[in-house]
Amino acid sequence: GWDELGYHFVIDNGKGGPDGRVETGTRWVGQKCGAHCGGTPRNEYNTHGIGICLVGSFGKRLPSAAQMAALEKLVTDLAETYHISARNIISHREAPKARTQCPGDVLHSYIAGHLRARVAQDVASAK
């Protein structure tokens, strides 16, 4: 059966909680593997990845400014703490054999371009 929320973190959009609030899921608290990225050959993105969900639909627009700021801070903090390379920051659709449009075209482009570059810059300047 399903074991609670599949993500480690959820970033609210202001409709179910404060805009930009980062909720820490029980999977992160208990250091459990994720259940957020199916379809990979050995389930490695769930076993070794950190799942972050932004509430909303991002095929035609970016998340709110508060969500974007929270995402950048969270990903930068995780990258610094756990020595995660910016090239390993991916969206769901980039996982091998993932058959999804998640997280939407606009957010995917942002993650693949701006977010990766910004996190790499932030981590380098923190050293």
Image: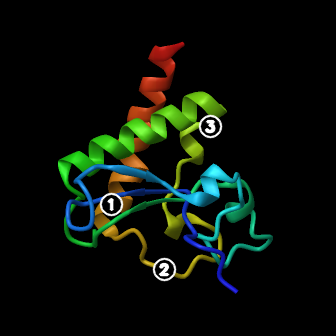
Packing grade of label 3 (10 A; few <14, some 14-19, many >=20) is: some
Looking at the image, tell me whether mark 1 or mark 3 is earlier in sequence order: 3
Is residue 62 depicted above or below 35 in this figure?
above
Q: What is the x, y in percent for residue 79?
A: 56, 35
Q: Which mark is residue 84?
A: 3
Amino acid carrying mark 1 in the image: Leu
Q: Is residue 79 left or right of residue 66?
A: right
Q: Secondary structure at mark 1?
A: helix
Residue at left offset 56%, top offset 43%: 87
Quarter of the image with the N terminus is: bottom right
Quarter of the image with the C terminus is: top right
Looking at the image, tell me whether mark 2 or mark 3 is earlier in sequence order: 3
Contact, CB < 8 Å: mark 2 with mark 3? Answer: no
Q: Is residue 123 left or right of residue 1?
A: left
Q: CA distance from mark 1 to mark 3?
A: 20 Å
Packing grade of label 1 (10 A; few <14, some 14-19, many >=20) is: many
Q: Which mark is residue 107?
A: 1
- Which residue is denoted by mark 2 in the rendering? 100
Residue at left offset 62%, top offset 37%: 84
Q: CA distance from mark 1 to mark 2?
A: 13 Å
Amino acid carrying mark 2 in the image: Thr
Amino acid carrying mark 3 in the image: Ile
Q: Secondary structure at mark 2?
A: loop
Q: Secondary structure at mark 3?
A: loop
Q: Nearer the viewer, residue 30 or 50?
A: 30
